[in-house]
Amino acid sequence: LQSQRPTVTVLAGDTALKDDGSDAIAGLTQAQKALPARFFYDDRGSQLFEQICDLPEYYLTRAETAIFRQYADDIAAATGACDLVELGSGSSTKTRLLLDAYARADLPLHYIPIDISAGILVESAEQLAKDYPGIEIHSLVGTYEQGLQQLPPASLPTRMVTFIGSSLGNFSEAESDTFFSLVAETLTTGEYFLVGIDLQKVVAVMEAAYNDSQGVTAEFNFNMLDHLNRRFDGDFQRDRFEHWTFYNADACQIETYLRAKVAHQVRLATLDLTVDFAVGETMLTEIARKFDLQQMQSCLDEHSLPVIRTFADSRGWFALLLCQK
Ligand code: AVI
């Protein structure tokens, strides 16, 4: 089979891709300081995240991969030939297990990865095109919202939108409601949505995943300061902060902060912003919600995305939910 060259479309859109730093200003001037988690993902941050996925304590990637290994054939059989739209595809590593399943079943597939990072998208599409010559690939560079709002018309009998890796956990409840509504608006009746969620479990296991012994997650957290310094001509000093993370059992989420070790001031010149930190003051950099299976099923139901199959790993730590509008 002759492999076709993958196509790439850079989506036009609102302000999401341009960066005036208004969200950083808003976060740094509120009573509980916070920074948008998107500032984790510069090139170094993306590399660090790949390293996190291989850490012994970070069970999420291995658990989800095990589910794909066991059930990818069932997922392919459930949807049949489809346009597979992946939100936040990154390097598409786990998705290969799905692509393999469609290939084994001889089911036609069009793959539409969507990611904000053009570099990783183009690179992985080129490699996928070589490895899966039968699959048509059309990459979209943009945010999830842009991707969903500007999807090409379905070219195969059905579509499946996937959102894996428990990236949903990094959304607040309000953000995830908005997101589910958008997915449901995008799909037509009978089309599919596959979502990966990290489940509630023993607290020590969840906390260790965000506070690994090699300090890679701490480095990932500190890297946000370097990123902000570069982007906004800032003078954050990482040795004035410490990595602090814990499971908030009331909110059912891991909360990760940078906590000031000393009272000091930080200046972000291009934002014309000076920020005061008291000793011990915290800056929230990420939430990672941990889900209850039944609650999530009801929530998806309420958004007209009823779950038709639930796949979990052998320890019941992680689940992939296949929903059909
Ligand atoms: C991308 N996301 C699902 C990761 C998570 O587990 O919430 C990001 C991460 N943050 C620290 N470690 C991993």
Image (spheres, helix red, strand yellow):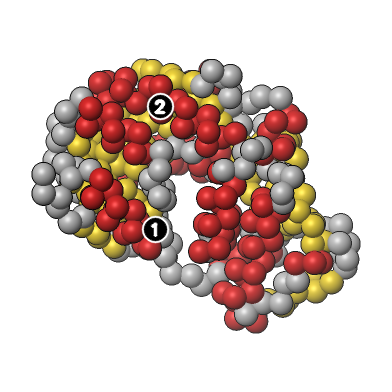
Q: Which residue is depicted at the point 68% across and 33% down?
A: 206
**Disc 2 versus disc 1: distance between alpha carbons?**
24 Å
Residue 58's disc number: none
Q: Residues within 10 Å of mark 2 (few under 14, many from 20)?
A: some
Q: Position of residue 280 (x, y in %)?
A: 86, 57
Task: Determine which quarter of the picture holds residue 317.
Answer: top right
Q: In this rendered view, identify the residue nearer to me: 54 or 174.
A: 54
Viewer-proximal residue among 238 and 270: 238
Q: Position of residue 257 (x, y in %)?
A: 73, 52
Looking at the rendered image, the disc whose residue lies closer to the viewer, 2 or 1, is: 2
Queried on whether the Cβ of the residue with tag 2 lies below 8 angstroms from ligand 1, the answer reads no
How would you rate the neighbour count of disc 1 (Cα within 10 Å): few for under 14, some for 14-19, many for 20 or more? some
Q: Is residue 83 visible from the viewing direction of this image? A: yes
Residue 261 vs 78, above or below: the answer is below
What residue lies at 55% left-to-right and 63% top-to-bottom?
44
Amino acid carrying mark 1 in the image: Ile
Outermost residue on the left side: it is 1
Task: Where is residue 21? Give x, y as percent.
Answer: 55, 69
Question: Height in image: 19 above or below 126?
Answer: below
Instruction: Locate the C terminus and report the quarter of the image it occupies.
Output: top left
Residue pointed to by mark 1:
120
> Camera-side residue: 221 or 14?
221
What amino acid type is highlighted by mark number 2? Arg
Q: Secondary structure at mark 1?
A: helix
The N terminus - image quarter: top left
Badges 2 and 1: C-beta atoms under 8 Å apart? Answer: no
Circle number at residue 69: 2
